[in-house]
Structures are given as C-alpha cells and as structure tokens.
Amino acid sequence: MRVAVDMKLCESHGQCVFAAPQVFSFDDEEYLVYEPEPDDALRDRVEKAAAACPVRAITLGPAS
Ligand code: SF4
C-alpha cells in the first residue's frame, strides 16, 4: 500500500494522527510526517485516516 499526502492541502488538523498513529505523526515543528509505504495490516486505519481528513489530503494506492 502506498500513502500520499498533498502537503499543499494539509492544514495539520491531526485527525489522521489520531486514526493511524503508526503511520502519521507531527515532527517537532508541527509538520505532518508519514510512512509512505505502510504495512498492509494498517490499511483499515489508513482508510479511516483518509476519510477523517477534513481537506481530503490523503490518497491511497497500491504498493509500487
Ligand atoms: S488529517 Fe489531513 S489535514 Fe490533518 S494532518 Fe492529516 S493530512 Fe493533514
């Protein structure tokens, strides 16, 4: 699974961090950082994160 976040859209709301803390987090400067190829076992959580994002900045795709 691949995850991409459009950082031009992201407003650091943090819903993705709550939904999938294994994949999304904030760095020391409150910028979102994320694992671009998380384990497929985390798909449910990543899908919840994408659905929760108020600006729809998260997209999922198949692994490369
Ligand atoms: S929920 Fe969306 S806007 Fe908020 S930090 Fe995550 S990607 Fe960015």
Image (tube, helix red, strand yellow):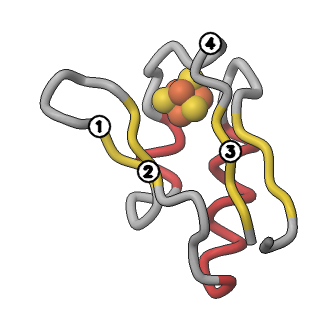
| Alpha carbons under labels 1 and 3: distance apart | 15 Å
Q: Amino acid at mark 4?
A: Lys
In the rendered image, the vertical position of residue 63 relative to residue 16, given as above or below: below
Q: Amino acid at mark 3?
A: Ala
Q: Nearer the viewer, residue 29 or 12?
A: 29
Q: Residues within 10 Å of mark 1 (few under 14, many from 20)?
A: some
| Alpha carbons under labels 2 and 3: distance apart | 11 Å
Q: Amino acid at mark 2?
A: Phe
Could you tell which of marks 2 and 3 lies nearer the N-terminus? 3
Q: Are marks 4 and 1 in contact (CB under 8 Å)?
A: no
| Alpha carbons under labels 4 and 3: distance apart | 12 Å
Q: Are marks 2 and 3 in contact (CB under 8 Å)?
A: no
Q: Which residue is mark 2?
A: 24
Residue 15 spot, x, y in % from top left: 51, 36
Q: Residues within 10 Å of mark 3 (few under 14, many from 20)?
A: some
Q: Which residue is mark 4?
A: 8
Q: Which residue is mark 1?
A: 26
